[in-house]
Image (spheres, rainbow, N blue to C red):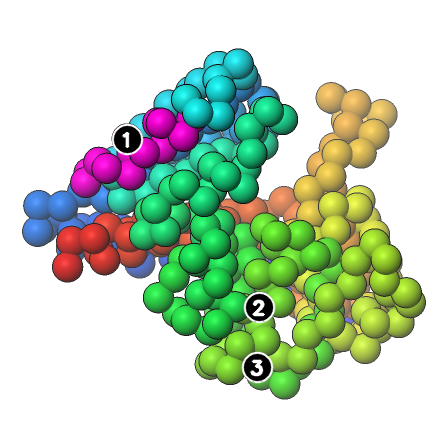
Amino acid sequence: MALDNLIDGRAIAEQIHGETAQRVAALKARGIQPGLMFVRVGEDPASKVYVGMKEKTSARLGIHSQTTVLPETTTENELLALIEQLNADNNVHGILVQAPLPKHISETKIYSTVLPQKDVDGFHPVNVGKLMLGDTSGFLPCTPAGVHELLIRSNVSISGAEVVILGRGNIVGKPMAAILIQKHKNANATVTVCHSQSRHIAEHCRRADIIVAALGSAEFVKADMVKPGAVVMDVGVNRIADPTAKSGSRLVGDVDFANVQPIAGKITPNPGGVGPMTIALLMQNTVRAAELATK
């Protein structure tokens, strides 16, 4: 298999950003600026990096963004009160509460309090329910929606394809399955979801036309698990020890990339594959929220 089979998530994300910027310009011509509010609780290093990246992208696309940082000791009621204020603010079209939250705060309760029409993360039960029902009026979670866009824009045939999703989490695995199984254009796949209790995972993977790896297990998908020509989407982010790296560690995905790439028909690198798409879909959701709120 040729080694020119990379799916360039950065390049495809830039395509989407260009489309989003045009929609922002159309809104601004009507005197409307999309507004996205970030809420971060505590000083988790990864959360600070992720929110910072989202802020920079917002500014580049002309979306007004602002971040409220609350101390780790913030109570659940205090956070709920802030969300209610943002819900009531007509200049705020999207609200993103960055995970993880402190253990004393219920993520489920927080995400359920954000208005569904401002839930640009796609985590509210109303939006989750719409996804399950095939109702396209809701917001899709950004990472699985980003994987779907990568498949579509890379001309991967999804209809009728055997798809194996590794991982059953609420953020990627479950919504990914729901997106791909719908009776919609660019869906209609036959989907198998594997998880920690699944038997014969390698056998499931070997019959897959498309593998979406979202287990959170470093380099779990080995070359002997992949059918020649299969499409491999690597969602995982894992830090492993590496004495040769300046920091003593490095980030890898859920796929043994070096050994799987020569076998795959198409494959996402990690980093530079799925990650940029998550932000691109967040920006797209925010602009759509502004469009719907100002019809």
- Dot 3 or dot 1: first in sequence order is 1
Q: Position of residue 233 (x, y in %)?
A: 66, 60
Alpha carbon distance from label 3 to label 1: 40 Å
Q: Is residue 77 left or right of residue 150?
A: left
Kind of residue indicated by mark 1: Gln
Q: Position of residue 199 (x, y in %)?
A: 90, 65
Q: Which mark is residue 41?
A: none
- Dot 2 or dot 1: first in sequence order is 1
Q: Is 46 located above or below residue 203 in the figure? A: above
Q: Start and end of the magenta stretch?
A: 79-91
Please identify the quarter of the rendering in which residue 92 is found: top left
Q: Which mark is residue 188?
A: 3
Kind of residue indicated by mark 3: Asn
Q: How many marks can you see? A: 3
Q: Main secondary structure of the magenta part?
A: helix
The C terminus is located in which quarter? bottom left
Q: Which mark is residue 178?
A: 2
Q: Residue at x 29, y 39 (%)?
A: 87
Label 1 sits on residue: 85
